Amino acid sequence: MSVASRPDPVPSAAGTLRPLVVGLVQINNSFSGQNYLPYSVALLQTYVQKMAADPGRYRFLPPIYKRVRIADAVEALKDADLVGFSTYVWNGRISLEIARRLKALRPGIVVVFGGPHVPDQPEAFLRANPQIDLAVHNEGERTFLKLLEAFADRAAWEDLPGVSLVKSDGTFIRNPNIDRVRDLDEIPSPFLEGAFDEIMAANPQESWIGLWETNRGCPFRCTFCDWGSATAAKVTKFGEERLYREVDWFADKKIEYIFCCDANFGIQKRDVDIAKYVAKIKQASGYPVALSVQNTKNATERAYETQKILSDAGLNKGVALSMQSVDKTTLEAIKRDNISLGTYMELQRRFTRDRVETYSDLILGLPGETYESFVRGIDQLMENGQHNRIQFNNLSILPNAEMGDAAYQARYGMVTVESKIINIHGERVELDDDVPEVQDLVVATAAMPRGDWRRTRAFCWMTALLHFDKLFQIPLILAHGISGISYRDIIEAFMTPDEERFPLLAEINAFFQAEARSIQEGGPEYVFSKEYLGIYWPADEFIFVRLTAERKIDAFYAEAGRLLHQIVSARRAGLPIEIIDEAVRLNHAMVHQPFAKTDLEVRLDYDHLEYWRKVRNGEEAVLRREPLAVHVDRTAKPYDDFQKWCREIVWWGNKKGAYLYAPRAAAITPELAGHY
C-alpha cells in the first residue's frame, strides 16, 4: 500500500482522537552479558515529549533495545501506528526484517528508518526495501517531531527536511538535510527526563551500559569513517551543568560502564573539567567503573591531560592511540594526513614514561598500504615504545563513508567480501528466528594483493602472540636491543620456520595462514571455540589457549628459543646463547598458566628483569651482569578452573596484556649462592 492511500490510524472507532502509538527500535549487541541503554531513540522520544505542541497526542511503546526473536519484536510492535528504527551495521538486516514482517502483518503501519546505516543517496536502498515508508537523514530529533506532528497530512511528508521516500507513483524524493542543532541543550536529556525509567524497572536483571554524548560533530574527514562525512563542521556542545547531572545519574543508577560517543574527547578545553568530574564522582560513589572515550586528534596536551585523569582514576583499561596507519601515502589516501602522526608518537612516549598503558589501533587493508609499509609501521610503533598492545583491525566499508563510493574503491583496487559481523570474544548467539548481520570486508587492494593481505594478517597475529600476548616479549626485546636486529625481522623469521626443525612453530604459522585465507573467502574474523568458553577468539589468543590446553607450552619455548638463537647467530650479532637462554627461561616461568601447584625460582646471571622493565617504560636500558634469583609466585592466586583462566587471564587481560606473573628478584650474595 502506498503512502498516499494508507488509512489514517489516529481516529478511534468512536470518532474521537486517540494517542498516536509510536514504537522505537535500537537493537544493540550485548557485551559480556550487558546491554546498552537505547540512547538514540530515547533522544527522539524525549524531544517529542518536551517539544511537541501537545505531548499527550503520543504514546510510546517500550523500545526494543537488544537482539530478540524477530517474531517477538513484531508482536511487541504490532499495535503501533508508526515504528522508528535507529540503524547501523550491527542491526541493519534484523531491522529490515522486523519492518518487513510488520508491514506484512499490518500494511497501514508506518515504518521510518534513520541512523548512519541509511545511505545518504538512498534511492536504490528504498526501492529495494518497500517496507520503509520514510528515511530520515542526519540528526533526527527535529525531523522526527515534524513527522509526528504532520502524521495525518501525508502530502506534507514530501516537504519534510532531511527525508527521502518513494511516492505512490514511483517518484523518488530526497530533501536537503535539516540544519544541525547548534544549541544542543534544545534536546532534552533522556537520562534526566526519565526516558529509561520504564525499561530499567521492567528489566531488573539487566546490567546496563550507558551511551553518552558531550558534543556532536567531527572536523576530520577520514574516508573510512562516516562520522566526519556526516558532521564535518563546527563541533556543537551540550551544556556542562547538564553533563554533570548526567554523570550523577549514572552514579545514582549504578551504571558501571559508559561509552562516550564523542568523536574527539579532549577537543574542547572543558573536557579536562568533565574528566575531573567523572573521576570525582567515581571516587565518591564507585560509579561509573569505566569511561571509554575516543581521543581527540592533534590536541596533544589536552589529550594527554584528559586521559591521564581517567587513567589515574581507574576509569580506563588503557589509552587508545588510534593511528590507523603510519604510512604517509596511505594517510593521504584516507584524508588523514592533516592529523599529526607526531602527536600520537609523543603521546605514546609520555604515557609510557608515566606508567600509563596505551594501545595503538592499526587498520589492515587501507588504500595505498603495502605489506612492507604496514610491517614497517608495526616495527616503528614497537621501536617507539608500544609494548602493551597494537589492535590490528580489518577494514570494513561503511555505506556513508567516502570509502563506500564505488569510484573510490575502483581507484584503489579494493576487493571486498561479505562476512558476518562477529564481536571479539562474543558468544555464538543462535536464535531460532534471527537474521545475521554482515559487513563488506576489504581483503585485498591494488597495493596489497590477496597473497600480501594474507601474509600481513598472519604477521599481525604472530606479532600479537609473541610480543603483545607476552609469550616471548622478554627475549624479543633483549634480542632487538642487544643485537640490533629489528623486531620485524625476528617476527618474520617465526613466520617461515623450517618445518622439520620447528614443527610446532610451523603448525602455528600454517594455522594463521589458513585463518587469513578463510577470512578472504567470507569466513569469520575470529576463531570460534566451543571448548574454550564458547566464544570467538582472536587467532593469536586462541593459539595461546590451545598451547596451554594441549600442554605444548614447553615445546613452544624450546622451539622458539632455538629459532631465536639461529636468527641471532645468522646475523653474527654476538649475543651469547646463554643470555638468550636466560631470557627464554625467564619468560617461560613468568607466563601465567592454570593448575600451577608450585612457585618457581629462576637463576640468572644477568638482570633481564630490569632491562625488560626499562625498555617497556621508555627508559635507557643496559643489560647488567648481576646474579639474581627470581621468585615467581604462581600459587598466591591459583587457577584450578581452566575456563576461568581463559576468561580472566587471556580474555580480560587482553588490553592490559596481563599475561605474566609479577616476579620478585633478589641478588645472589656469596652467602646465598650455596642455596642455588
Image (cartoon, rainbow, N blue to C red):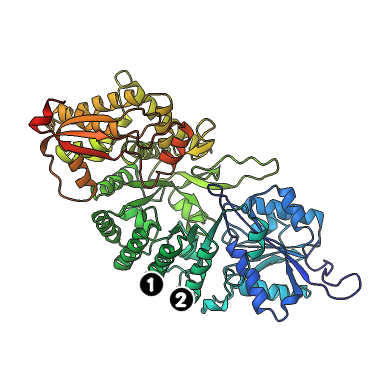
Relative image position of residue 577 (x, y in whole percent): 16, 27
Expressed as whole percent of the image width and height from the top left, the position of residue 194 reads 62, 69
Residue carrying label 2: 240
- Residue at 44% in and 36% down: 645
Q: What is the quadrant of residue 431 in the picture?
A: top right
Residues at marks 2 and 1 touching, judged by CB atoms closer than 8 Å: yes
Residue 108 x, y percent position in the rendering: 81, 62
- Local packing at callout 1 (Cα closer than 10 Å; few below 14, some 14-19, many 20+) is some
Q: Which type of secondary structure does the marked residue at label 2 adopt?
A: helix
Q: Is residue 254 above or below residue 387?
A: below
Q: Nearer the viewer, residue 380 or 190?
A: 190
On-image quarter of the C terminus: top left
Q: Is residue 539 above or below residue 502?
A: below
As shown in the figure, which amino acid type bears the numbered disc 2?
A: Glu
Q: Which residue is mark 1?
A: 273
Residue furthest to the right: 14
Identify which residue is drawn at 31% across, 66% down: 305
Q: Is residue 630 above or below residue 655?
A: above
Of the pair 244 and 307, the residue shown nearer to us: 244
Instruction: Tell which circle, 2 or 1, labels the residue nearer the N-terminal end.
Output: 2
**Within the image, what quadrant is residue 640 found in?**
top left
Q: Is residue 239 visible?
A: no
